[in-house]
């Protein structure tokens, strides 16, 4: 997977060139995460690269973004529960510390995580997990990607 799209994640999604996109939602794009040390990690990207904060969106679009975050969280939950009986829960986060555009993280959590980390924020995992090629998004993550996409389709069709 080439990485040019990573320099303009939202623009590449708008142009249909972002290979991580799972589905277009009402106020953004559901994408599979770049790293998969917690299989199913996904991100919701706002559909306007100029938007840095949730408060910059008009109220209706703000609520749509939060609704999209809920839908993506539910899709990840259903998919991960189906694929791994050790699934525990989903953590939803809007942080905005690194990337200068509005986005939300959806982290699945599992019983098999190290006992010293399972109850802590994902950001406390060792730095090696973020750079280890074993966890880099690739074809070996197609099954979880397909399950999340299937759930997104099901959940959004019901709306």
Image (spheres, rainbow, N blue to C red):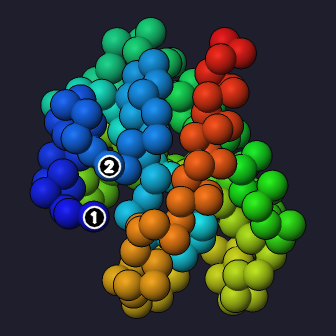
Q: Secondary structure at mark 1?
A: loop
Q: Position of residue 2 (x, y in %)?
A: 20, 63
Q: Tell me how many marks there are.
A: 2
Q: Nearer the viewer, residue 158 or 140?
A: 140
Q: Is residue 80 left or right of residue 63?
A: right
Residue at 65% x, 17% y: name it.
157
Q: Is residue 4 above or below residue 35?
A: above
Disc marking residue 97: none
- Which quadrant would the N terminus be assigned to in this image? bottom left
Is 1 rendered above or below residue 103?
below
Q: Is residue 156 left or right of residue 111?
A: left
Q: Residue at point 45% right, 66% down?
A: 139
139 displayed left or right of 38:
left
Q: Considering the image in quadrants, where does the C terminus appear?
A: top right
Task: Identify the image quadrant of residue 54.
Answer: top left
> Residue 84, image x and y in percent?
79, 66
Circle 1 sits on which residue? 1
Closer to the camera in the image, 77 or 12: 12
The local crowd at label 1, few if under 14, some if 14 to 19, many if 20 or more residues have their Cα within 10 Å, is few
Please indicate, yes or no, whether residue 28 appears anywhere in the rendered image: yes
The residue tagged 2 is: 19
Residue 64: image x %, image y %?
A: 49, 18
Label 1 with label 2: CB-CB less than 8 Å: yes
Which one is nearer the viewer's eye here, 79 or 119? 79
What residue sits 61% from the left and 33% below the top? 152
Residue drawn at point x = 69 percent, y = 66 percent: 109
Q: Helix, strand, or loop for circle 2?
A: loop
State the image coordinates of residue 145 (x, y, percent, origin top left).
55, 53
User: Can you say whether 53 is above or below 94 in the image?
Assistant: above
């Amino acid at each position: 997977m080439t990485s040019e799209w990573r320099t303009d994640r939202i623009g590449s999604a708008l142009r249909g060139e972002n290979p991580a996109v799972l589905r277009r939602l009402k106020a953004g794009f559901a994408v599979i995460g770049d790293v998969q040390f917690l299989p199913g990690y996904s991100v919701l990207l706002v559909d306007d690269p100029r938007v840095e904060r949730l408060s910059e969106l008009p109220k209706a679009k703000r609520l749509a973004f939060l609704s999209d975050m809920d839908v993506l969280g539910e899709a990840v939950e259903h998919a991960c529960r189906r694929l791994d009986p050790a699934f525990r829960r989903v953590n939803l986060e809007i942080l905005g510390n690194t990337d200068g555009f509005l986005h939300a993280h959806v982290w699945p959590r599992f019983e098999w995580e190290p006992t010293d980390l399972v109850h802590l924020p994902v950001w406390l995992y060792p730095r090696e997990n973020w750079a280890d090629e074993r966890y880099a998004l690739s074809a070996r993550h197609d099954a979880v990607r397909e399950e999340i996409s299937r759930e997104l389709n099901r959940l959004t069709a019901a709306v």
